[in-house]
Image (spheres, helix red, strand yellow):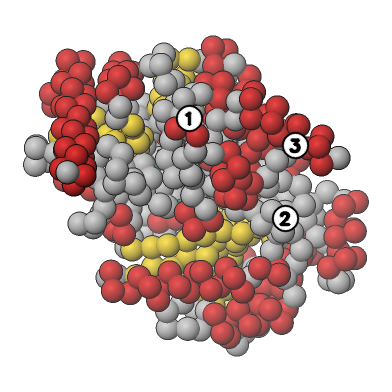
Amino acid sequence: MALAMLLAISSFFIISAHASSDNFLLCLSRAIPEQLLFTRSSPPIASVLASSVRNPRFLTPATVRPLCIVTATNASHVQAAVVCGRRHGVRLRVRSGGHDYEGLSYRSARAEEPFAVVDLVGFRSVRVNRREATAWVDSGAILGELYYAIAKVSGRLAFPAGMCPTVGVGGHLSGGGFGMLLRKHGLATDHVMDATLVDAKGRILDRKAMGRDVFWAIRGGGVGGSFGIVLSWQVKLVAVPPTVTVFTVERSVEQGAVDILAKWQEVAPSLPDEQGAVDILAKWQEVAPSLPDELLVRVVAQGQVANFQSLYLGTCDALLPVMSSRFPELGVDRTHCKEMNWLQSVANIFLGGGATVEDLLKRTASGDTVFNKATSDYVRQAIPRDIWLQIFTSWLARPTAGLMILDPYGGKIASVSESETPFPHRAGVLYNVQYMNFWGSAGEEAARTGWVRDLYAFMTPHVSKNPREAYVNYKDLSLGANVVGGGNVTSFEAGRVWGEKYYKGNFRRLAMAKAQIDPNDYFRNEQSIPPLGNQIILTNVARVDHAA
Ligand code: FDA
């Protein structure tokens, strides 16, 4: 009898889930042209889904796939997807460039919740206003398209965002976005002036209509479409000189890479001398960053080699005296310098010496289809030399090793206050570390991801603490995932585990902004911002009062 009832109840849920999915698709078909709607019964859905998947880890038979994909080409398609989704209980994932490290723009970790993907690949125009030095860019554009469009209008304008040209504007600006101009100009999101957002009611809101808190939140806290779907962004462009200089220097461990790396930690973000960490930090607090903001030297450490990749906003003649006075150990001379314009430098640094600026328009790049796993840290105190020695001779020397990417901060990025945008990793940060591993077949996954996990554990004493900070655009679900609590909304308390790593104290304000725009938590995923309503705030205040 009980079994019969259970079967009846579960088949009711299956039937009603089917019914709501069918009604959802019917609703979409009334508002969206047939050729833009790919359902599970239309075979092209597989290739549309795969078209911007950057990590085959999330395209296996076990991957939870969408009910359908809407390849929106105008705002009304996005609005229809939201309205139909809410009406029929289907959640949305939004994909711009598909680079999400956990694939959350096109897959779900929860099999029980049906979802659809809004893919903005067809929503990607860039409109540059040379006179005002601004641009409106649609979320589905890739960074390469944005850079190219700007430079074609003026060779003296640029935009400070990520290095990889295939990254989507939508996800990148939502989480911060930094690249070779970060020391001179800060984050991509620091330059957002306005945006258009489709909210959970299907309305299109601009900066004024969405209000101060939500506009603050989407500039760095828009994880996974927590607040809605951003259609377009208005950004302020920055000035660049007609000539910039690129140089790369490789040092192997035998050549003294460990010594140079130890020195680099001191010099690159801001620190001028070779004393102990305490003396250096004390001095650092007095003076502006010692390397000029025009100069960024990043490091890729792989195998027994540290590769120093650099961009200087100026000529080789101007660069050489800076390098010889501030970082003579690297031995940079005229033979290292490659002078070019800014757009060429973007192609050169990420795609290699043979790349053309037209290559920046390609939505795929070699290496896009390699299995990978990454996580990140922030370093606020220089890591001792003996630890770097251990990293090279033990961690990076293993057959299953990946690589480490070190991006120096300081300069403009550090001059913005922690609460100006949701991105809090500002003053005091020496550099960001990314631990990455790659592999070619599913069988290697355990060993390769294990290397990332174990190195992350080893680094604990040497990186930021309380919270241990991480960069949201290098999303990592092993830092923690959401729990859905009472009222069918995501739990704020559970979210703090990962949220304070990405946002520090800004996590609470983000959750309050979420409660303003999406109190019922329609836009949610494994690491979306939970809504924190008045009731919960009062409860917390009461708890603090009680404790006091
Ligand atoms: P994707 O489309 O997968 O979206 C990422 C997240 O944002 C998802 O949760 C998605 O739902 C959400 N989202 C996307 N569009 C949205 C929209 N319109 N509205 C609301 N939510 C939206 N970072 C960096 O700072 N500097 C760098 O140099 C690089 N380089 C780099 C290289 C490579 C090869 C990869 C794979 C990644 C990077 N990144 C990076 C990280 C990158 O900034 C991050 O993965 C971005 O979120 C990617 O944005 P996409 O639009 O491509 O991803």
Dot label at residue 487: 1
**Residue 440, position as x, y percentages in the image:** 29, 70
Looking at the image, which is closer to me, 186 or 248? 186
- State the residue position of label 2: 466
- The residue indicated by pointer 3 is 543
Residue 499 visible at all: no
Closer to the camera: disc 1 or disc 2? Answer: 1
Helix, strand or loop for disc 2: loop
Labelled disc at residue 406? none
Residue 434 in view: yes
Residue 499: x and y, percent? Answer: 59, 45
Element type at marker 3? Answer: helix
Q: Residue at x 46, y 40 (%)?
A: 484
- Residue at the location (17% across, 43% down)? 1
Q: Nearer the viewer, residue 334 or 63?
A: 63
Count of numbered labels shown in the rendering: 3
Image coordinates for residue 275, horizontal then vertical, percent: 87, 71
**Which numbered disc, 3 or 1, marks the residue that appears first in the sequence?**
1
Instruction: Please state which amino acid type lies under the numbered disc 3.
Output: Arg
